[in-house]
Amino acid sequence: MLPLLVRFALGPLVRSLYRPEVEGVENVPAHGPVLLAANHRAALDTGVITFTTPRQVRFLGKAEYFTGKGLKGRFIANSLDALGYIPVERGNASAGLAALEAGRRVLEAGGTFAIYPEGTRSLDGRLYRGHTGVAALALSTGAKVVPVALSGTEAIQPGGAKIPRVCPIRVKFGEPLDFSRYEGQDSSSAIRRSVTDEIMYAILELSGQEYVDSYHKRPSEGAA
């Protein structure tokens, strides 16, 4: 019941309030496994993708968000599940493998899974080098990859503002990328790197961001 409420009641309300400009939504295949690969500008990007994509989308979410106590904890967990989040542990190599496995299960079941190849939000508005997990998922499942470019979401809650602002938002869906030519080569690190770079270039063409050929690191993680 809650997923239907979120999708068919809350979704139209959010769209009517923010009136996002959506381009290329017809590029999202109606059937079969689809991997949405998006740039990452703000914490609310996940909600924007959820409410502008015609299919139900699954995302990764921190496991601790699902472990709250009491009625409030259960409500938050159910709400996140309705929004499409899958709880996963973060912070180490085994957690990374678990995250990929969670995405693989969604795609192998013919669903739609969204991933941010940069791995974290861009703090300066530039597009950073993608991690190869997006390629590993595409190659191992045969899913079509739809590049997604978000803009304007970074202005909704600037500086951690408590009250979201109403501001222009744009979502662009690019044409699906098919990597079936690499079937059976998903174990090749060179192929995964090549596929990831192709995906990032497609996002770059949609977003018009400045590209940085290095992984994005937050200030606490050291210089990029």
Image: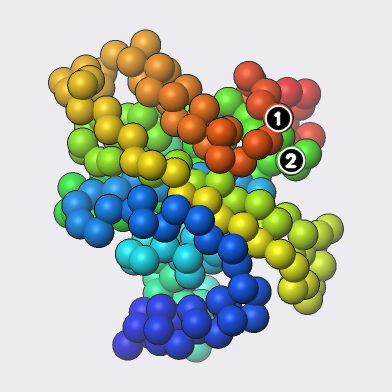
x, y (%) of residue 144? 28, 41
Asked which secondary structure carries label 2, the reply is loop
**Residue under circle 2?**
125
Give the quarter of the image for residue 199. Answer: top left
Q: Residue at x 60, y 67 (%)?
A: 20
Q: Amino acid at mark 1?
A: Glu
Give the quarter of the image for residue 19. Answer: bottom right
Q: Amino acid at mark 2?
A: Gly
**Residue under circle 1?**
210
* Residue toward you, 151 or 221: 151
Q: CA distance from mark 2 to mark 1?
A: 8 Å
Circle nearer the viewer, 2 or 1: 1
- Residue 216 can be seen, yes or no: no
Quadrant for the N terminus in the image: bottom left
* Residue toward you, 38 or 104: 38
Q: Residue 149, labelled with which disc?
A: none
- Mark 2 vs 1, N-terminal side: 2
Q: Is 4 left or right of 118, judged from the image as shown?
A: left
x, y (%) of residue 8? 40, 84
x, y (%) of residue 75? 48, 83
Asked which secondary structure carries label 1, the reply is loop
> Badge 2: how crowded within 10 Å, few (<14), some, or many (20+)?
some
Q: Is 156 left or right of 183, judged from the image as shown?
A: right
x, y (%) of residue 161? 81, 67
Q: Residue at x 40, y 34 (%)?
A: 134
Q: Residue at x 37, y 61 (%)?
A: 57
Q: Circles 2 and 1: CB distance less than 8 Å?
A: yes
